[in-house]
C-alpha cells in the first residue's frame, strides 16, 4: 500500500523568548520557549510579533491554567505543547497540547495509530531538555538551564512526496 502523502507548509522556526514559569502550587515549574514559524501566509497565526496575544499574556494564562509537573513548554501562537517528566516514572516525557488562542485541548493522535511528537524546533528543544534532565542531580539545576537553540529550518518540505513519486 503506497503512502498517503499530503502537501505540507514550509517550515522556518525561530525560538525567541524564554521564561521560567512557576505554578501556584509551589512545586510545578515549566521552562517556556516562545516559537514562531516565519514566512507562512497569515503571520498572525504563526508569529508572535504578529499575534494579538503577547508572551506576557500567555504566561499569565498558562499560570492560571495551573499545569502540574516539571518540564518545558513550546508555545507557538497557534499551538502549545506542555512536556513534563512523568510523575510516575520520571525517565519518561509526557506531552499534552492545546490551542494557544482558545485553551482547547488538541488531540495528538494521528493517522494509522501514530501520535504526534514534535516539529523540528520542538525536537531540538526536547533533545536539550531531556539531556539537561538526565544530567541533573536535582530539579533546581535543571530549571536553570535553557536550550540555546534559536532556529530550525526544514530545507525541503516536499522530499517525502518526491521520494514516493519516484518509487515504482
Image (cartoon, rainbow, N blue to C red):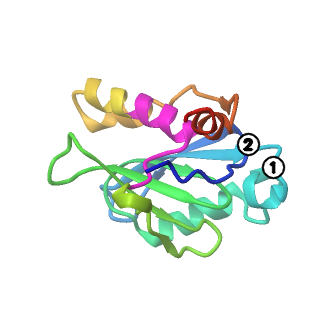
Q: Earlier in the sequence, mark 1 or mark 2?
A: 2
User: Label 1 to label 2, Cα distance in Å?
Assistant: 7 Å
Q: Is the residue under label 2 in contact with that under label 1 (CB below 8 Å)?
A: yes
Q: Residue at x 39, y 64 (%)?
A: 67
Counting from the top left corner in percent of width and height, residue 62 is at 52, 64
Image coords of residue 61 (percent x, y):
57, 69
Task: Name the foreground residue: 37 vs 86.
Answer: 37
The quadrant in which residue 100 appears is bottom right
Look at the picture and state if 135 lies above or below 68.
above
- The verdict on residue 42 being magenta is no
Q: Which residue is mark 2?
A: 10
Q: Main secondary structure of the magenta part?
A: helix
Q: Which residues are magenta?
A: 115-129
Q: Is residue 163 left or right of residue 38?
A: left
Between residues 48 and 159, which one lies in front from this camera angle?
A: 159
Task: Sort mark 2 into few (<14), some (14-19) or many (20+) by Cα contacts within 10 Å.
Answer: some
Q: Is residue 167 left or right of residue 70?
A: right
Amino acid at each position: 500500500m503506497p503512502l498517503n502523502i499530503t502537501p505540507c507548509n514550509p517550515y522556518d522556526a525561530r525560538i525567541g523568548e524564554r521564561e521560567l514559569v512557576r505554578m501556584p502550587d509551589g512545586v510545578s515549574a515549566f521552562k517556556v520557549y516562545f516559537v514562531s514559524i516565519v514566512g507562512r501566509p497569515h503571520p498572525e497565526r504563526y508569529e508572535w510579533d504578529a499575534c494579538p496575544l503577547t508572551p506576557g499574556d500567555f504566561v499569565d494564562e498558562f499560570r492560571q491554567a495551573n499545569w502540574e509537573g516539571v518540564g518545558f513548554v513550546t508555545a507557538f501562537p497557534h499551538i502549545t505543547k506542555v512536556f513534563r517528566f512523568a510523575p510516575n516514572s520520571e525517565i519518561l516525557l509526557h506531552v499534552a497540547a492545546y490551542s494557544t488562542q482558545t485553551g482547547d485541548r488538541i488531540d495528538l493522535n494521528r493517522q494509522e495509530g501514530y501520535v504526534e511528537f514534535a516539529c523540528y524546533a520542538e525536537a531540538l528543544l526536547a533533545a536539550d531538555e531531556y539531556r539537561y534532565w538526565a544530567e541533573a542531580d536535582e530539579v533546581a539545576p535543571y530549571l536553570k538551564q535553557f536550550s540555546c537553540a534559536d532556529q530550525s529550518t526544514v530545507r525541503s518540505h516536499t522530499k517525502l512526496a518526491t521520494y514516493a513519486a519516484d518509487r515504482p
